Amino acid sequence: MVDFVQWDSVPKSGGSGERSDYLRLESGKTYRIRPVLDPVKFFKYFHKKDGRLRTAICGKPDVCPVRDRHPELKKPTLRYAAYIIDRNDDNRVKILEAPQSVFRPIGSSVEATGKNPGSGQDGSDWQIKVNGKGLNTTYDVAMAGPSPLTSDERAAIKEAMDGDKEKLKKLYETDTPEEIEEKLFGELKSKTDKSTSADTVSSDFSTEADVSTEADVSTAVVPLTKSNDDFDNNW
């Protein structure tokens, strides 16, 4: 089960529904973002078949019957995703999916400041510099200053979430073994087929450049945090 996690739980080392707007990190570029609420944590398969990068989300990376049937399948990698405001794109609300090396510096700020980086009042902007290519891609992540959300930004966030604070969890819902098998090895369905997962047939926001080999499967999932519980109240 995919759930929200606290920012400071991102370790230091190693879905279905409507399509959302994603921020894709590209090598050689610098981004400025503002995290919103809490991230979700999940394990994701990346597999190439017929020249296409296919993905699926696994609930138990160490015990997966699909890997038993397909020894060529690499172990799923630990990933995080969160709503962010893209300062480089007219402050549009997007989803950032990336390896833990992107999210951990943001989470580390909790240890230093005691503040939730996704909080409406106490959150900050962050700068992400992307260097290198392929599996040698690295990310320089640094705080860019306090950034309380404006009323317009709060409204845009709720609109992006369709008023559903659980939407991010639903977008990254864990696939069953049967669904993993179909997404990674089955015949590609028509893009007009509503049952087709967006990231099964496309690599919109997940490329080989940001498929990290780091994975800490022992990290515990932390329960839903206050910043999300207070979405309709004090957030």
Image: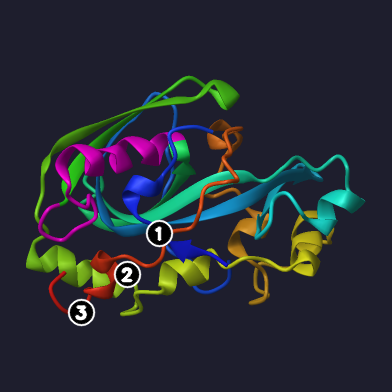
Instruction: Choose the circle earlier in sequence order: 3 or 1.
Output: 1
Residue 135: image location, x then y, percent: 59, 25
Q: Quick one: SS at disc 3?
A: loop
Q: Is residue 223 within the magenta segment?
A: no
Mark 2 → mark 1, Cα distance in angstroms: 9 Å
Say few, some or many: other residues with alpha carbon within 10 Å of mark 2 (under 14 / 14 to 19 / 20 or more): some
Residue 102: image location, x then y, percent: 40, 37
> Residues at badges 2 and 1 in contact (C-beta under 8 Å)?
yes
Instruction: Choose the circle earlier in sequence order: 2 or 1.
Output: 1
Q: Quick one: SS at disc 1?
A: loop
Of the residues shown, which amino acid type is indicated by label 2?
Answer: Ala
Q: Residue at x 58, y 46 (%)?
A: 218
In this rendering, the label closer to the viewer, 3 or 1: 3
Q: Residue at x 46, y 50 (%)?
A: 80
**In this rendering, position of residue 66 left or right of residue 4:** right
Q: How many marks?
A: 3
The residue under label 1 is 21
Residue 157 shows which numbered tag?
none
Mark 3 → mark 1, Cα distance in angstroms: 23 Å
Say few, some or many: other residues with alpha carbon within 10 Å of mark 3 (under 14 / 14 to 19 / 20 or more): few
Q: Residue at x 24, y 55 (%)?
A: 118
Quarter placement of the C terminus: bottom left
Q: Quick one: SS at disc 2?
A: helix
Residue 160 shows which numbered tag?
2
In this rendering, the label closer to the viewer, 3 or 2: 3
Q: Nearer the viewer, residue 219 or 86?
A: 219
Q: Which residues are magenta?
A: 101-122
Asked if residue 178 is positioned above or below residue 66 in the image, the reply reads: below
Q: Residue at x 72, y 42 (%)?
A: 75
The residue under label 3 is 232
